[in-house]
Image (tube, rainbow, N blue to C red):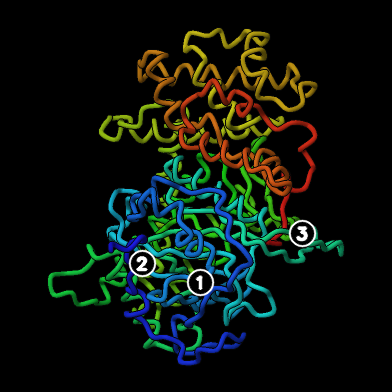
Amino acid sequence: MKPLLPPIHSIFTSSLPADPDTSNTSRSVEGAAYSWVSPTSTKSAQVICVNNALAKALGFTELSLTSNEFADLVSGNAPASSIQSYAMNYGGHQFGQWAGQLGDGRAINLGQYQLHSNQQNETVEQSFVTLQLKGAGQTPYSRRADGMAVLRSSIREYLCSEAMFHLGIPTTRALSLTLTGEEVIRDKLYDGRAAFEPCAVVARVSPSFLRFGSVQLPSSRGDLALLKQTVDFSINSDYPHLLTESKNITKEVYLNWFTKICERTAHLIVEWMRVGFVHGVLNTDNMSLIGETIDFGPYGWIDNFDLNWTPNTSDAAEKRYRFGQQAYIGQWNLFQLANAIYPLIEEAEPLQNILTNYNQTYQTLWLAMMRNKMGIDTNYEDAVDASNLIESDLQLSKDLEKILSLVNTDMTLFYRQLANISKNVNADDLILIKKHFSDCFYQPETITESYLTQLSLWLERYKQRLLIDNLADSQRKAKMDNINPCYILRNFQVQEAIELAEQGDYSRVLILSELLKTPYKQQAKYKEFESKRPDWATNKFGCSALSCSS
């Protein structure tokens, strides 16, 4: 009889050293990339959401998705005997300070599935992906925590990872969201008012869950053997094109590997800036070696454009991980990775040169992204005045961000409305301009004549720039609408879905997961989701700020 579930492989565990201690006790784990650990059995398993397209790509049939075996698999409740599950060992810098060993404190990896279609990060070359359960119980890396995840944080992870994927942004994927029947006590506001909350598990998928911290930890301990094994595994698994025919990994290969990570990190953060995403906790243990968005904790999406906004209450004072500083933090984290791999290179200059190139790569990608958001053609590199055009486009982009910052302007709605404005519009008609963008403004009383004049002057410059491209308004709109989403995962909309789900109503979770599959196309039946943040959500927890509690 054919097995109901597809076969699972042990590629990671067969390639890297295991922790010889098999007890599930919190401890320091030396000389090992992972520890063997089984998920905690649950009271029950109620699958709320399944990503059918991803499931099919992993080899799950429609019959298997409705089976008890699948529910047990994705909840961690008695997985198949053939599965040797494990938790990964890594360290990291948290809020700029070295934290030492961290590891998978509530994530347990089941193994690798072969991917049967193009459902992964297109920059990654391997066809195997790891299935990981987040919130599946204690591991040797849980420290004093219980290893569980609550429903609210699990809903946020499931929806955001899939929203990112359909926006075209490299990300881990979500296969399923499952209630476990358990409850745990959480103090979500850190104000002493702890309460019981329902638990859930997100089954998530990625070609690699290796992080910067996976390399940092062995390096910090002087464990050069494990450092080399970890980096070599990353190269062989996720960057095989860097290898020569001999398959030897030389110093040049290590440098090329680091270069690719820098390039992917720059690309990832530019993509976040494009859609207004703020990760919230860009510690080095939350940075992927393959350039994916990973670990959706207290993230947030920009409603009104604000480069200083952070969704994380733990970062409210310093704002280290604020929206406008993500590119800098990306470089800071890459610097820590460079320090970690220095023993493999033993030369500082080539690493420093690569880090310096990160800045140029980011700026080039950022300008290309901004030109696309404004519907401006980018194919002018061979023009005689290319450098002048680049400089003027850069200034136009920066000045637009200043305009958006003058009053509380909804970023998503503004760019969609900018696509609708004619290049023949009379930019001096302040009444017309105010009416055209009225839906974008959160505080109409702040839209003064002085502000409108500044917006008008920018629009006139924008019009003149459009004349160079000579695109029809309809062509420009089509181009802009393909890069500027109509729908993002707005914080208040997620919070509404969470509050309903905590009452046993999962309908809004399902609606959002369906809506966000086509974020660039306006959908008449989802008109209500095109609106900006309502006043009641401006300062509400879960809508304007979140804690790390989960």
Q: Mark 2: which secondary structure?
A: strand
Q: Amino acid at mark 3?
A: Lys
Q: In what quadrant of the picture does the N terminus appear? A: bottom left
Coordinates of residue 25 in the picture (x, y in percent): 60, 86
Q: Amino acid at mark 2?
A: Gln
- What residue sits right under mark 1 in the picture? 78
Vertical side of 446 occupied by 61: above or below: below
Coordinates of residue 63 in the picture (x, y in percent): 39, 51
Q: Tell me which label, 3 or 1, sits earlier in the chain.
A: 1
Vertical side of 166 occupied by 525: above or below: above
Q: In what quadrant of the picture does the C terminus appear? A: bottom right
Crowding near pointer 2: few (<14 within 10 Å), some, many (20+)?
many
Q: Mark 3: which secondary structure?
A: loop
Coordinates of residue 94 in the picture (x, y in percent): 62, 69
Left or right, 377 with reference to 427: left
Q: In whole angstroms, how far apart are the C-alphas of marks 1 and 2?
A: 18 Å
Vertical side of 40 occupied by 263: above or below: above
> Is 388 or 374 nearer to us in this picture?
374
Circles 3 and 2: CB atoms closer than 8 Å:
no
- What residue sits right under mark 3 in the picture? 188
Q: Amino acid at mark 1?
A: Ala
Residue 288, numbered label: none
- What residue sits right under mark 2 in the picture? 112
Closer mark to the observer between disc 3 and disc 1: 1
Q: In whole angstroms, how far apart are the C-alphas of marks 3 and 1?
A: 30 Å
Q: Is residue 135 visible?
A: yes
